[in-house]
Image (cartoon, rainbow, N blue to C red):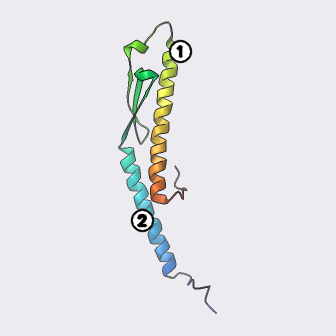
């Protein structure tokens, strides 16, 4: 008695698992910092609107080409800006998810 198919409660297997989990968490934090400090540039409308965002989803800049500014068609400019902002956010999120998945082996569960 006292054996559980080679698993000892409180034994080395659990300690190894905890060490692996801690190492994975450290790697995830490292990746988050690296991606968080990376800038992503998105351009829409043939370069009419350009957005730069970092991996923390903080906007660094928005550039609007003077050619995109048409007082008679403000809605088009608004649509271009929304499109650029949304694409920039998607790009940053995708980069974060991809890099974290490399570290976690796709386990998820880290709030991304």
Which residue is outermost to the bottom? Answer: 1
Q: Which mark is residue 5?
A: none
Q: Position of residue 112 (x, y in %)?
A: 52, 49
Q: CA distance from mark 2 to mark 1?
A: 50 Å
Residue at 53% x, 15% y: name it.
75
Count of numbered circles in the view: 2
Residue at 39% x, 45% y: name it.
36
In terms of secondary structure, where does tag 2 sit? helix
Relative to 103, is 78 above or below? Answer: above
Residue 22 or residue 45, whichever sits in front: 45
Residue where numbered disc 1 is placed: 75
Query: Label 1: how many residues lie within 10 Å, few (<14), some (14-19) or many (20+)?
Result: few
Q: Position of residue 103 (x, y in %)?
A: 45, 58
Q: Position of residue 39 (x, y in %)?
A: 36, 38
Which residue is outermost to the top? Answer: 72
Which residue is outermost to the right? Answer: 1
N-terminal of the two: label 2 or label 1? 2
In terms of secondary structure, where does tag 1 sit? helix
Residue at 35% x, 44% y: name it.
37
Residue 52 or residue 10, whichever sits in front: 52
Residue at 40% x, 23% y: name it.
47
Q: Which mark is residue 23?
A: 2
Relative to 37, is 72 above or below? Answer: above
Residues tagged 2 and 1 counted as in contact (Cβ below 8 A):
no
Which residue is outermost to the front? Answer: 46
Relative to 34, is 64 above or below? Answer: above
Q: Position of residue 17 (x, y in %)?
A: 49, 72
């Amino acid at each position: 008695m006292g054996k559980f198919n080679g698993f000892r409660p409180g034994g080395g297997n659990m300690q190894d698992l905890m060490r692996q989990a801690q190492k994975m968490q450290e790697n995830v934090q490292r990746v988050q910092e690296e991606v968080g400090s990376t800038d992503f540039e998105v351009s829409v409308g043939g370069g009419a609107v350009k957005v730069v965002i970092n991996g923390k989803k903080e906007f660094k800049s928005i550039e609007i080409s003077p050619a995109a500014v048409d007082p008679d068609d403000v809605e088009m400019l608004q649509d271009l800006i929304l499109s650029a902002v949304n694409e920039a956010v998607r790009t940053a999120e995708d980069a974060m998810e991809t890099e974290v998945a490399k570290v976690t082996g796709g386990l998820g569960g880290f709030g991304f």
